[in-house]
Amino acid sequence: MRIALAAFFLCSVLSSGVAAGETVSQNARSAELESILKRIKLSPGFSISLYAIAPGARTLAVGREGKAIFVGTEEKNVYVMTPGENRAAKVERFAPSLPFVMPHGVCLSTDGVLFLVERNRVTRFDDAENTWRDAAAMGKVIVKSGDLIPRNEESRGHASRVCRIGPDNKLYISLGQPYNVSPLDKIPLYEKTGIGGIIRMNLDGSHREIFATGIRNSVGMTFDRDGSLWFTDNQVDSMGDNQPPEEINRADRPGLNFGFPWYGGGHVRTNEYARVEPPKDVVFPVVETAPHAAGLGITFYRGEMFPKEYRGALFYAQHGSWDRSVPIGARVMVTLPGTTTSAPFAEGWNIGSGSYLGRPVDVAELADGSLLVTDDQNGAIYRITYQKP
């Protein structure tokens, strides 16, 4: 079956007339974006600059060999950045001949396998940093379309998948549910399939299981050194400007329920389930974050470039409000070790009245300890560095 799939992909490449490695111009809008970045507020010693342009850039997977950084989007394109010293040396389309549908989730295993999670399919590409130019022929579908979620549950809403490889060498995937608040009659199906939760499986797609439930829409996951999974969760809309809180959660074992749809965020009950008994032993968030700020990508900082107080800190991106009379977010936040609160780390993209100069989505650390930030509004990736004042 894999041979047939590879042959199909190869035929697609030959018949499409599109060359692998289609290059993305890095000159368009560079001056404009650098001008916007001058408005961004950071603590003394920190600076932010344009690293690359990649239309619709959302998620990042940084290769361990330093040869490639993979960029997922919500549309149909995936990109590969060739790292450079201060800016990416080149940005190219990944497998432009392949038909992707919301190829948002990108993650890499320790041995260099790239996993690409679309709205309803999962593909793996072995030794991706070295073979990505042959990706169309090398790809192996490990969860075929219609098997990740039932086809009749497909939706644009809450379908931006994220993935991570756990310390158990399993593939973890978040499956956001497509409603503001899930209808009661959907709960049995969602509990069976893992929609509104996080699933995990072997790296060949076998032995799928539900790892966590009670999650509305997680678009950011990361693992701590103790093996626990931390994740952001976007919470219920239309409950007022100041409630419910969004969440950063911790799952240190399988089988935990994080309370949705009985809870709309934190300890706030949803109107729809106010009279429905919630599950026992609901796990509440480690950090309650700003309501309607849309916390997305998250990572632990492990580098040494930033000052010591940031080592082990949680950095996460807030995409920005749509369901709030005074929008908040469009910034990078930080939760320092030993605390349960968050503070702005990089802000200034939100200029009020519902207008944004950019909308951060994901954060990822480079080998030198600098931090990359994606911005899907501008199709850009920024780099935050530190030099002692």
Image: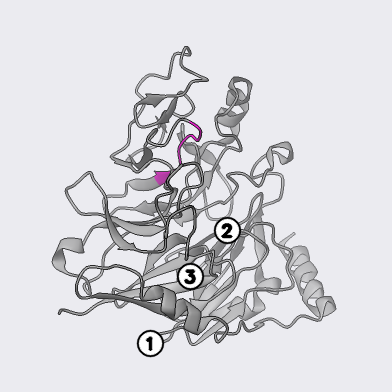
**Residue in front for this viewpoint, 249 or 374:** 374
Asked if residue 111 can be seen in this view, the reply is no
Look at mark 2 in the image and give the residue it sits on. 104
Contact check, label 3 and label 2, Cβ < 8 Å: no
Decide: is 276 above or below 249. above
The C terminus sits in image quarter: bottom left
Crowd around label 3: few <14 · some 14–19 · many ≥20 (10 Å): some
Query: Which amino acid does the dot numbered 1 rest on?
Result: Glu
Query: Which amino acid does the dot numbered 3 rest on?
Result: Gly
Query: Which amino acid does the dot numbered 2 rest on?
Result: His
* Mark seen at residue 85: 1
Pointer 2 or 1: first along the chain: 1
Distance from disc 1 to disc 3, alpha carbons, whole Å, reads 22 Å
Pointer 3 or 2: first along the chain: 2
Quadrant of residue 286 within the rendered picture: top left
Total marks drawn? 3
> In the drawing, does residue 364 fall left or right of residue 377?
left
Pointer 1 or 3: first along the chain: 1
Give yes or no for residue 76 being in the magenta stretch.
no
Q: Of all residues shown, which one is farthest toward the front?
A: 353
**Residue in front for this viewpoint, 96 or 130:** 96
| Magenta span | 232-238
Residue occupying image coordinates x 58% and y 66%:
56
Look at mark 3 in the image and give the residue it sits on. 112
